[in-house]
Image (cartoon, rainbow, N blue to C red):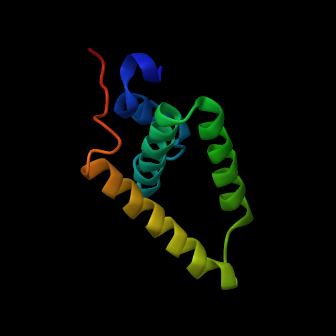
Amino acid sequence: MQPRLGVLWTSLVFAAIHTQYGLSLDSVAVFILAIGLGLLRRFANTTTSTICHVAYNTLVGVTVSGAWLLPAVGVEIALVLAGLMAFFTGKLGKLRTAA
C-alpha cells in the first residue's frame, strides 16, 4: 500500500486496524508509531520495519519497568528528537502522497 498511497495514508490505515477500542490517546500513539515504521520501511526496507515492529511489540508485552524505565524513556525521547531533526532539516526528504 505504501508505494501507492504514501506514508500518511498507510499509517492511518495501520492505526485503524490496530485500534481496538475507538479513538483514544492509544490510537494517536499507534498512528505515530505507524509513521515511524512507514518511514523506516521507506528509507531502509520492509524487513527492517517488520523487525522493529516485532521488537516494539515484544518490549510492550514484557512491560519495561523498574530500573529499565528511565533509560527506555530516554532512548525513546532521543529517537523522537533525532527523527524530528532529520525531518525538519530535510535529511529524510518529503513525505510522498498519492499523485
Residue at 63% in and 47% down: 52
Residue 52 drawn above or below residue 74: above
Is residue 54 shown left or right of residue 11? Answer: right
| Residue 42 versus residue 52 in the image, above or below | above
x 40%, y 47%: residue? 23
Q: Which quadrant is the C terminus positioned in?
A: top left
Q: Can residue 22 be seen in this view?
A: no
Query: Dividing the picture into quarters, in which one does residue 31 lie?
Result: top left
> Residue extending furthest bottom?
67
> Residue 8, position in %: x, y?
35, 34
- At 51% from the left and 42% from the top, the residue drawn is 37
Q: Which of 42 and 56 is in front in this view?
A: 42
Residue 16 image offset from top left, x and y in percent: 46, 36
Residue 18 drawn at (x, y percent): 54, 40
Q: Where is residue 91 in the image (x, y as percent from the top left)?
A: 33, 45
- Quarter holding residue 7: top left
Q: Is 66 on the left or on the right of 89, as rendered?
A: right
* Quarter-of-image position of residue 6: top left
Observer-nearest of 28 and 39: 39
33 to 47, vertically: above or below: below
Relative placement, left or right, of 67 versus 97 is right
